[in-house]
């Protein structure tokens, strides 16, 4: 009898193992198909933009006419093999390893392509950022599937919201650090939650080295997600040491050391807004809450002889209402899942960014572009709604989620298209 029971247990285990493997294979196939479709769409868009001469060879005007994206500066100063670091000291203080990334990219590009035009280089960097975007998308899927336990259809739904977000669209096609920073944060969350210390250390160094202010969300995630408190030190100390070693190896380390205090002082006056209380509230709502996810109203003007575009502090009623309900569900999900380690970590990352951009008002004016630093946290907190146990509330949530996706499709794609159509006419 006992022998038969053991045989039955063994057979059950084998069947369960086969079933799990089959599910993993299906997941991989679904993911490859989805990411493949996204790649084709993004690559085709980038190619179409290049074909229509949007990447102008004189670089007279570029995406940095929108908000404060710095793509002209990045293509001329960062993504080059030039070892003259005098003009990049303010950038490398905030983004210490970005010039190294740019030089490495330039070296690979020069080895692969000959007789490049500026338009070619711009296109290549966009494709590089497109690939980085898709890597972040894959890890977002892994978090949704493995840590939140969502069904594939809901995973792909949240991933689509991520791809349609204003900052993801602009962050992919504009030469800047934001899409890379976002991917590193998503990957950090995944490996910290998986208790993978070595990968977490590597990502901690890269995350902080690329964007200094992101050391705080990384530390927050490490403290909350690492289950063994000794592991916090095992990850934290090597991160600090590793970052110190990286800094010492940088060819422009003297610029960082010599200009750190001056750069902080300059940033406090440049990036921190000094404006009235009502204006601050409007900027918080539109720049930090709404526009990173949904396109808002745009305005076009002329400054110093060049045309520029900016976002107005207003949005259509349907966009504003949709985003308010979006965050209402996030609040609901937080309350229902406040004891979940994953939710606590996401909430802490979100609160940190609110304190940085809304209370300290750092980068408040350009809050849209900083949205990539916490967009993943918002979407993951929202994704908890697919696990709501109350059937009526869950049905309402899913219905709203579909409506929200339609709002993004309606306004974000139109907004992006309007930019592309307007810019060739600009001075």
Image (cartoon, rainbow, N blue to C red):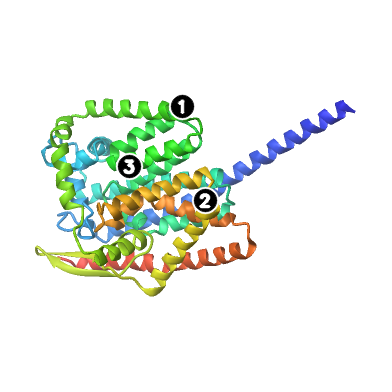
Position of residue 127 relative to residue 207, above or below, is below
Residue 78 in sight here:
yes
x, y percent for residue 22: 65, 42
Q: Nearer the viewer, residue 137 or 237?
A: 237
The residue under label 1 is: 230
Residue 313 at x, y percent in the picture:
28, 68
State left or right for residue 409 relative to residue 288: right
Give the crowd class for mark 2: few <14, some 14-19, many >=20 residues within 10 Å: few
Secondary-structure class at tag 3: helix
Q: Residue at x 32, y 42 (%)?
A: 214
Residue 214's tag is 3
Name the quadrant containing residue 298: bottom left
Labels 2 and 1: the sequence-earlier one: 2
Q: Between disc 1 and disc 3, whose residue precedes?
A: 3
Question: Closest to the observer: 129 or 286?
Answer: 286
| Circle 1: element type | helix
x, y (%) of residue 3? 86, 26
- Give the alpha-carbon distance from disc 2 to disc 1, as whole Å: 40 Å
Residue underneath mark 2: 33
Q: Quadrant of the C terminus?
A: bottom left
Nearer to us: label 2 or label 3: 3
Are discs 1 and 3 less than 8 Å apart at CB?
Answer: no
Q: Assess disc 3: are there few (<14), some (14-19) or many (≥20) residues with their C-alpha within 10 Å of its C-alpha.
A: many
Task: Give the CA distance from mark 1 to mark 3.
Answer: 22 Å
Which residue is rendered at x = 48% and y = 53% of the image? 381
């Amino acid at each position: 009898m006992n022998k038969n029971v053991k045989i039955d247990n063994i057979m059950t285990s084998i069947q369960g193992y086969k079933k799990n493997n089959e599910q993993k294979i299906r997941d991989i196939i679904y993911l490859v198909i989805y990411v493949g479709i996204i790649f084709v769409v993004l690559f085709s868009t980038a190619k179409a933009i290049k074909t229509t001469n949007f990447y102008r060879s004189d670089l007279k005007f570029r995406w940095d006419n929108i908000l404060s994206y710095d793509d002209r500066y990045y293509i001329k100063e960062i993504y080059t093999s030039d070892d003259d670091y005098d003009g990049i000291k303010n950038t490398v203080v905030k983004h210490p390893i970005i010039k190294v990334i740019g030089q490495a990219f330039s070296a690979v590009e020069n080895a692969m392509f000959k007789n490049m035009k500026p338009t070619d280089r711009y296109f290549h960097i966009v494709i590089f950022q497109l690939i980085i975007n898709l890597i972040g998308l894959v890890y977002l899927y892994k978090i949704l599937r493995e840590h939140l336990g969502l069904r594939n259809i809901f995973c792909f739904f949240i991933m689509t919201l991520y791809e349609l977000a204003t900052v993801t669209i602009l962050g992919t096609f504009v030469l800047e650090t934001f899409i890379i920073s976002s991917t590193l944060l998503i990957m950090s969350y995944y490996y910290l939650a998986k208790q993978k210390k070595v990968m977490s250390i590597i990502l901690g160094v890269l995350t902080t080295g690329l964007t200094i202010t992101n050391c705080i969300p990384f530390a927050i995630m490490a403290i909350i997600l690492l289950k063994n408190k000794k592991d916090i030190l095992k990850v934290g100390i090597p991160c600090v040491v590793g970052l110190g070693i990286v800094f010492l190896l940088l060819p422009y380390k003297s610029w960082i050391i010599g200009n750190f205090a001056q750069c902080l002082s300059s940033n406090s006056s440049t990036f921190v807004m000094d404006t009235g209380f009502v204006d601050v509230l409007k900027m918080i709502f539109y720049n930090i809450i709404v526009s990173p996810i949904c396109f808002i109203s745009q305005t076009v003007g002329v400054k110093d002889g060049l045309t520029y575009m900016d976002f107005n502090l207003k949005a259509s009623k349907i966009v504003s209402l949709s985003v308010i309900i979006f965050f209402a569900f996030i609040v609901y999900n937080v309350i229902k899942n406040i004891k979940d380690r994953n939710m606590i970590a996401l909430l802490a990352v979100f609160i940190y960014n609110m304190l940085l951009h809304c209370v300290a008002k750092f980068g408040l004016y350009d809050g849209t572009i900083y949205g990539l630093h916490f967009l993943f946290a918002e979407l993951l907190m929202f994704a908890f709604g697919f696990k709501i146990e109350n059937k009526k509330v869950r049905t309402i949530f899913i219905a709203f989620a579909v409506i929200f996706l339609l709002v993004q499709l309606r306004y974000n794609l139109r907004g992006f298209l309007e930019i592309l159509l307007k810019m060739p006419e600009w001075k």
